[in-house]
């Protein structure tokens, strides 16, 4: 559910029942702290019910705030921003990220990197592409300082997408080449799929709808439809758009 995937949501869904049982036990035992983390785990399993996911993550955030747990609160805000993003509430997601960035200072550099990237995505989706690029570059600098390769490759793909959206297609392709190598080396098949998705977008912007269709089709073949609902749906929409354009 998170923009680009921060938590292993496939694993989270696999233990959805355990999260709920843990929440019940912790609530019964009066362990409010453990219950808040279990509640956040439940929110991460609700990919097909985004309204419930947002309500559950918001409740977890309130509990972490009351308990004075900054890490838990930042984790809850990560989930909230992601759900807002997938609900199309980009301004709300940006506001959540800005609030979290102010709070993360001095607490968690990894969380700062995550929120910088998600803020970039939110601004990109509302047409503020140059601003998004600034956030992606700040995220990249931080990821490299942290030697956090996962965060780096996630931000690189988004940077390539934004550069291409401004017509800098060759620059974007160069970034994607580096990014693709990182995904292959990491064995990240979802990342490889999203590289194909971005190549499809670039092909369309260049006016080559047939190449766009090939890239979107390759993306869909790499995605797991049972565990990557959002991207699978988006990719099918793009394939339908390409086929319609090609007649």
Image (cartoon, rainbow, N blue to C red):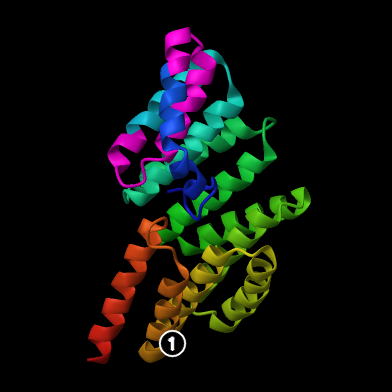
Residue lying farthest to the top in this orientation: 30
Residue at image position (48%, 35%) is: 77
Residue at image position (42%, 48%) is: 1
Q: Residue 147 appears at what percent x and percent y? A: 76, 52
- Mark 1 residue element: loop
Say whether residue 126 is visible.
Answer: no
Q: Residue 234 appears at what percent x and percent y? A: 34, 65
Left or right of 197? Residue 86 is left
Residue at image position (31%, 42%) is: 50
Up/down of 52 relative to 155, above or below? above
Q: Residue 52 appears at what percent x and percent y? A: 30, 35
Left or right of 195? Residue 211 is left
Q: Quadrant of the C terminus?
A: bottom left
Of residue 188 and residue 134, the one placed in the foreground of this image is: 188
- Residue count near mark 1 (Cα–Cα under 10 Å), binned few <14, some 14–19, many ≥20: some
Q: Residue 161 appears at what percent x and percent y? A: 51, 70
Of residue 234 and residue 160, the one placed in the foreground of this image is: 234
Say whether residue 9 is visible.
Answer: yes
Up/down of 4 relative to 22, above or below? below
Up/down of 247 relative to 161, above or below? below
Residue that badge 1 annotates: 206
Magenta residues span 25-54
Name the magenta segment's main secondary structure: helix
Q: Is residue 42 magenta?
A: yes
Q: Quadrant of residue 174?
A: bottom right
């Amino acid at each position: 559910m998170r923009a680009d995937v921060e938590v292993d949501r496939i694993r989270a869904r696999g233990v959805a029942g355990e999260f709920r049982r843990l929440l019940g036990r912790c609530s019964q035992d009066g362990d409010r702290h453990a219950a808040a983390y279990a509640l956040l785990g439940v929110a991460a399993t609700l990919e097909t019910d985004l309204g419930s996911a947002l309500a559950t993550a918001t409740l977890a955030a309130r509990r972490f705030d009351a308990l004075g747990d900054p890490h838990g609160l930042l984790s809850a805000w990560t989930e909230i921003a992601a759900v807002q993003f997938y609900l199309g509430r980009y301004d709300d997601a940006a506001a959540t990220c800005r609030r979290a960035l102010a709070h993360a200072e001095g607490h968690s550099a990894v969380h700062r990197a995550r929120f910088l990237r998600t803020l970039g995505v939110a601004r990109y989706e509302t047409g503020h592409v140059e601003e998004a690029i600034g956030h992606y570059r700040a995220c990249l600098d931080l990821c490299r300082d942290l030697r956090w390769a996962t965060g780096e490759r996630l931000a690189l793909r988004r940077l390539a997408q934004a550069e291409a959206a401004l017509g800098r297609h060759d620059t974007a392709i160069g970034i994607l080449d580096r990014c693709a190598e990182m995904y292959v080396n990491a064995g990240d098949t979802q990342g490889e799929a999203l590289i194909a998705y971005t190549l499809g977008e670039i092909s369309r912007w260049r006016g080559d709808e047939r190449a766009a269709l090939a890239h979107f089709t390759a993306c869909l073949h790499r995605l797991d439809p049972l565990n990557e609902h959002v991207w699978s749906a988006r990719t099918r929409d793009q394939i339908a758009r390409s086929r319609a354009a090609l007649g």
